[in-house]
Image (cartoon, rainbow, N blue to C red):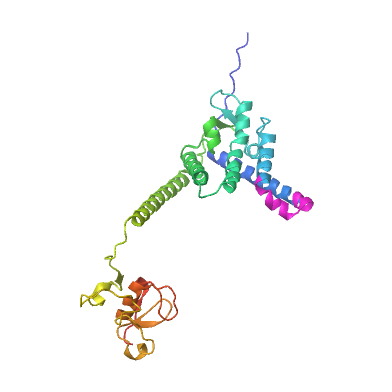
Amino acid sequence: MAAALPFPSFPAAQQAQIIRSNQRDYFHVSALRERTEGVLRAWLGTRWITRWDKEIDLCVKVLYYGLNVGRATQTLGEEYTDIWQHSVHTERPPSRRARAALVLLPTIPSYLLSKWGSLIPQNSSLGSVLKRIPVILEVLSEINLAIFYFRGTYYDIAKRVLGIRYLSSMPEDPNTRPPSYSLLGILLAVRLIHRFVGLLRSGSKETAASNAEKRPADNSHEIYIDDRPVSTMLGPADPDGAPQKAAEDDERTILDITQIPANRTASCATECGHLFCWDCIVGWGREKAECPLCRQSLNLNCLVPIYNL
């Protein structure tokens, strides 16, 4: 009897093949959507296209991947690079359930989140949760992509979850070294670390702001202008022991506009462009946060000293 022929084995697809395949599929999906929108715009108008934009995107992706992956055939990108999907669990092509999941997982969740996010109020607890889910999914996708650049398997997260890898029908060339994408993985990892650090900083700022709102107001909080504390620019708050008066009733802070140009000392300018004395405007601003002339909001931290005037 003749010896049984060995079952042919195929090498794993290279990173470059997988990347080019996904780029090619993205190009064909974009072209299909553009042509679909052109036909629908001619029939139903631009307003209808704008209203059903998410549904059109969903139908185009389900149609493209359903006619290829759903029928256990290659997509146009996979055919272009000559690679095939392969299940690591069964060592065979993906089953019907796996193919259905490959079509629906990348499309249905994002569509439902976008629809529910627009219907549920953002200030509700459920709305805040739905608002965070797309960000979490985006971060998980970037982590998966960084791992792909390092290891060369599972370009998208749905295939990693289902255990679907790629085989190449092209034999390996032992004299050719495949290109490495580790640098892209490092850059993506740096971006993720920067994003994580920014998230921690924003969280600490929000915590500090909430704590500041909970603390009672502290009237002794010092304000600095031009690196000088305001308390050193003013005299004692109440030298005679008399009760404090409002700024508009206190003779020390009443601003007589007709006397300012002639008697102004230690001049400073407000954000609105008016000139006052340091003592006068600071004393006024601590009681009433508005310009005495134009009533625009007054921020003592933004006063600009004017010298030689």
Camera-side residue: 218 or 18?
A: 218
Bounds of the magenta span?
A: 39-54
Q: Is 55 rendered above or below residue 240?
A: above
Occupied quadrant, residue 116 = top right
Residue 20 horizontal/vertical position (percent): 59, 43
Q: Is residue 238 left or right of residue 203?
A: left
Looking at the image, the residue that sits furthest to the bottom is: 262
Residue 243 is inside the magenta segment:
no
Occupied quadrant, residue 164 = top right
Camera-side residue: 104 or 55?
A: 55
Looking at the image, the residue that sits furthest to the front is: 243
Residue 49 is inside the magenta segment:
yes
For image coordinates 37% across by 53% down, the residue present is 210
For image coordinates 30% across by 86% down, the residue present is 265
Looking at the image, the residue that sits furthest to the top is: 1
Dominant secondary-structure state across the stretch colored magenta: helix
Quadrant where the N terminus sits is: top right
